[in-house]
Image: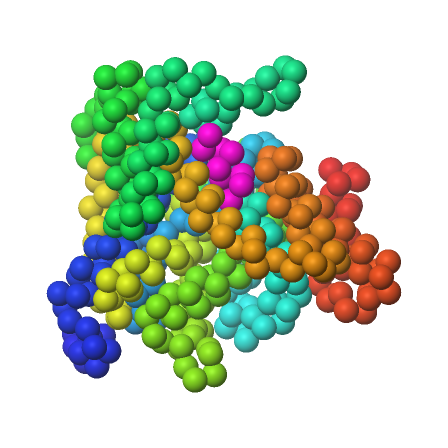
Amino acid sequence: MEEFFKIKQRGSSYRTEVIGGLTTFLAMAYIVAVNPAILSDAGVPFEAALTATCISAALATIAMGIFANRPIALASGMGINAVVAYGMCGALGIDWRVAMAVILLEGIVILALVLGGLRQAVMDAIPLDLRQAIGIGIGLLITFIGLKGAGLIVSDDSTLIALGALTEPSSIVAIVALLSAIILTLMSVPGALLISIIVAVIIGIPLGVTPLPQSWSLGLDFSAFAAPFQMVDGTPAIVHVFLEPALLLFVFSLLMSDFFDTLGTAVAIAKEGDFIDEKGDVEDIKAILTVDSGGAILGGFFGASSVTCFLESASGVAAGARTGFSNLIVGLMFIICAFLAPLFGMVSSAATCGALVVVGFLIMSEVGSIAWDNAEVSFPAFLIIVGIPFTYSITNGIGLGFIAYVLLMLARGKAREVKPLMWVAAAAFLVMFLFA
């Protein structure tokens, strides 16, 4: 074990690795409750989504520990699961198994790009400001989804949306969840978001908001597995992707989001864990990206949405984790969670409100990185940021920003500075807006 993981060589110990692994798990365990809740809105059975979430996270995290030997845990990505539930299944009305096929194909494409050494070309295609804007817009959408699901924001005939009744039981539970999540996060309490969910679930029992289990069967539900190859209207789900041109745009947009989020996460964790070389490159980056790409394939196949590197891994690194051994601990904890579906079924939308809002808040930290004094990129970035939550569509927001970017660059006489891939993407979005 020592020879394989190099624990002492990296200045760590088994005890430190275990503590680091547990810390990482506590920091990201909210995904066990939140991801099934979001995917259930897409039509995925809750217990099946929970099993898929836990098993795929466990396998991908353990794979990262073994093949890359870096303390980076993986699970279903927040934001991408929203694309599945509210973009593809919600806005387009497609079957959730077809959406998982999109995730699977995105993973295959991104894996080919990584193995082919083309990641730099893909990275250069979209301006950094626009990539950051996509994450920020998704963060706002996640926040809106959390507030809406809890009843803190409701529809209104006069103003479209309005503040919900704060005295309603679900609103009270949501406020407790929100305050708990914010306060515990600011206090740097390990597992802050998970604790906020647990507190809200307990508060919701006497208020009638928390649904009590109807069955205590602790078995696993594998009905979501092999989702892309399950039959939809008599045809394998994956075939439907090639029959709907708009879905191929999702493959592209998810690829960009997944790819660049992973790079950013890897750099942030590498700085904390001191595995950046003298040139500023992340050590073992190809292995990290390869496992992450495989995570997207795994998540699509299992029906858990794209499985990707979690920034919360930095908390475990801060606790001392330096090797992939800590990933074995995280993976074990996810496997244990897979058998607790009846307990996680008690988690209401109100209980997850705090976690969703805080995740949105954390994502918003990137807004200061956008070059707001350069309108050629800042205005398209602005359209992406507001377009995603205002249209309740990740695709629409990205499309508005891409089209605005190429038009502004063309008007300013800088058309040659636009990468060919951006022209293709903008044209595809324009066609979609005109004829979809």
Residue that extends furthest to the left in the rendered view of this protein: 15
Q: Quadrant of the N terminus?
A: bottom left
Colour logic: rainbow
Residue 352 placed where, x, y %?
A: 36, 34
Q: Is residue 78 left or right of residue 329?
A: right
Q: Quadrant of residue 294?
A: bottom left
Report if residue 54 is visible in the image: no
- Per the rendered image, the range of residues in magenta is 139-147
Q: Which residue is at a point 66% across and 52% down the rendered structure image?
A: 381
Placement of 398 over or under 326, stated as above or below: above
Q: Is residue 377 left or right of residue 153?
A: right
Q: Which residue is at a point 31% across and 36% down the rendered structure image?
A: 180
Name the foreground residue: 409 vs 101: 409
Residue that extends furthest to the bottom in the rendered view of this protein: 278
Q: Quadrant of residue 329?
A: bottom left
Name the foreground residue: 246 vs 356: 356
Name the foreground residue: 403 vs 425: 403
Q: Quadrant of residue 150?
A: top left
Q: Which residue is at a point 56% across and 56% down the rendered structure image?
A: 368
Report if residue 359 is visible in the image: yes
**Residue 229 lies in magenta, yes or no?**
no
Placement of 302 over or under 293, stated as above or below: above
Q: Is residue 435 left or right of residue 144?
A: right
Give the prevailing secondary structure in the magenta stretch.
Answer: helix
Q: Quadrant of the C terminus?
A: top right
Q: Which residue is at a point 47% across and 43% down the rendered structure image?
A: 360
Placement of 197 over or under 366, stated as above or below: above
**Residue 145 lies in magenta, yes or no?**
yes
Residue 7 placed where, x, y %?
A: 20, 75
Residue 23 placed where, x, y %?
A: 24, 55
Q: Is residue 265 left or right of residue 403?
A: left
Residue 232 placed where, x, y %?
A: 52, 36
